[in-house]
Image (cartoon, rainbow, N blue to C red):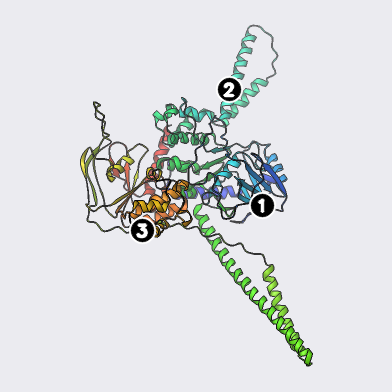
Amino acid sequence: MPKKGASARARARAAENDEATTKKGAAAGGRKKRQTLGEEISDEEEEVKLKSGRGKKAAPPRKGKKPDSDNDSDNASDNENEDDGKVPKAKTRQATDVKVVSKTAKMQAIMAEAQSKGDGSEFVIKLQDFTMSFAGLTLLDSTNLTLAFGRRYGFVGANGLGKSTLLRHIAQRLFPGIPKNIQILYVDQEVDATDATPLASVMEADEERNNLYKELAKLEEEKKVEEAQYAAGVELEYDGARDERIIEVQKRLAEIGAHTAEARAYAILSGLQFTEEMIKGPTRHLSGGWRMRIALARALFCRPHLLLLDEPTNHLDLHACVWLEDFLSKWKKTLLVVSHDVDLLNNVCTDIISISQQKLFQYRGNYDAFEHIASEQLRQQIKAYEKQQKQIKQAKIEKGKAGKAEDAAKKKAKEKGKGGGGGGNRREGSNQAKKAAMRKVREVEEMEKIAKPPKDYRVSFSFEEADPLPHPVLQVQEVGYRYPAGPGEPENPFIFENLNLGIDLDTRIALVGRNGAGKSTLLNLLTGDAEPSKGMIITSRKLRIARFTQHFVDQLTMDQTPVEYLMTRFSGMSEQEARNQLGKFGLTGKVHLNKLGTLSGGQKSRVVFATLANSKPHILFLDEPTNHLDIQSIKALADSLREFNGGVVLVTHDQYLISAACNRIWCVEGNGKVFEFPGDFKAYSEKLLEEIAFHEEEA
């Protein structure tokens, strides 16, 4: 059924959260330990080591060095593992140590073993006091994690802290406390390019269904043979076991919805924007990005007990993102998803897990609730820390004063002793005052120290103010476009016809449409990278434009530093001016003199943004600018676009960025037309969900 609106979705999620919260955990006979928001549950320590790889001991973190070895770096990793239709297993490139430090480690294993005797339909994973290292760096240190059945967890934190590594370790079951009978799927690699169709590839992923059908076929064949023998007069013993097993298999097939499997697989592929031709064609004709979508479809189709997703929207267009968000919001089992998509974290997740300072912190609620609670906790921690530091400073002063006063008193007593005299009462009062002061000093010194709060991670983007230009700044008049034909070839069909569009300095447009509809081609026309086949595009003579694409990121001069790159692009720019420009886009000073080839994808994107901004554009054309950016950077980009006084034309799958930065929606439908949607992005996304529901009902 189509969606009834965002408010209905919010109410449904709230009701689901309340219902899930009341469920009792299966672990430890139903006992459940309450966990305060943002705090950890810790037990007394006892070492139990579980090693993988070469079994090297976990090394302590290197001072001054941030872990950057895991897949959380902004760079997308290339995966070489092949998908053989089984549960995907993560690949570890270097020896990895997992160290569980807990008095309850044996109890965790016992609890997991007890849960493993069931069908895995409900479970609780409790990992307590564990330490996780990768490539000799400690990523998590004596921390805790609880994953309860039916909850959907969003996993957030700065890049490079260990989010992807933790997902891989859970998928590989490297921790005690994970029940053996639960199915865990981790989507981290594309399927192979073969002659198999996407539909067949997805349906093959459900091993239980496939095995049941094979068993049923074998049982029925045996039954036919026996019936033929009986008809021929052969005397046979009959105990009914086979018929009972046939009934059991048929019952299980009905329970897992085996008869609707093809329709479900088709609906998932359709939701991920596969066309009819793509669904029924060979996977070898598809790009890596589309084969990654097949891997995602396989996981969604299997409906594992625990689904692990790592940035699932990175390979999707806007339509597929809207569908995936809706699909996951109805996920009845357990989900752990790493994502920088704020809309997905808000509309899907019932809980948020944050990683910071080698610890995991869990919060009930979606991302907005997490931000509010975490911000308040940080404010209180800073306040308490500063208060304690003042007490410690004052205690040191009092201790020094007391020491000086004691020395002075001793000296004075010694002098008076030589000459005789009284003053005993005064000395007694002075001693009592000194004792009271020292007692207060000891109390401060012995109090539990409050940890120094982490530095508040803030990113800011800043575009130069655009010079005023007369209207219209850019005008499209009766434009048609088709790809040029080769010598002796027939003319290609028109991609666009009779386009009439206008862009001014106050324009905030999001271009939306399915993959292949022509959004990038339209950007090429608007930026002058493609010439109209007919009609004309008129621009102001003084117009300056800037365009962001992933291609420009890939074309950076990798053997130059960010500072050298800017100074080369803009003659006359000093080193300090280059540093200032890079700083405007959140690139920290410590990487200004590193080679571009060593930077992460997000850092390279910041260099490109700094370059574009320095050209002082009147209009920004942005094609998927959020790839490799973290949540704080995406929010900073949205803020800067709102403050920018020039025009913005945006192509993105990030729903938050569209909602925050754009006030107009241009639909590129793929039929040669471009029209403005009569409403905001919220209305447009609701329309998409209605279309998705309609197509699912047809399937």
First in sequence: mark 3 vs mark 2: 2
First in sequence: mark 1 vs mark 3: 1
- Measuring 47% from the left and 30% from the top, which residue is drawn there? 263
What kind of residue is marked 1? Lys
What kind of element bears circle 1? loop
Task: Where is residue 663? Give x, y as percent.
Answer: 34, 52
Say above or below: 116 vs 427: above
Where is residue 388, by image quadrant? bottom right
Task: Where is residue 165? Give x, y as percent.
Answer: 57, 44
Determine which residue is flagged by label 2. 214
Query: Could you give the CA–CA distance between mark 1 and mark 2, rounded to whole angstroms?
Result: 44 Å
What kind of residue is marked 3? Glu
What kind of residue is marked 2? Lys
Question: 157 or 669, which lies in front?
Answer: 157
Horizontal side of 446 relative to 604 (left or right) equals right
First in sequence: mark 1 vs mark 2: 1
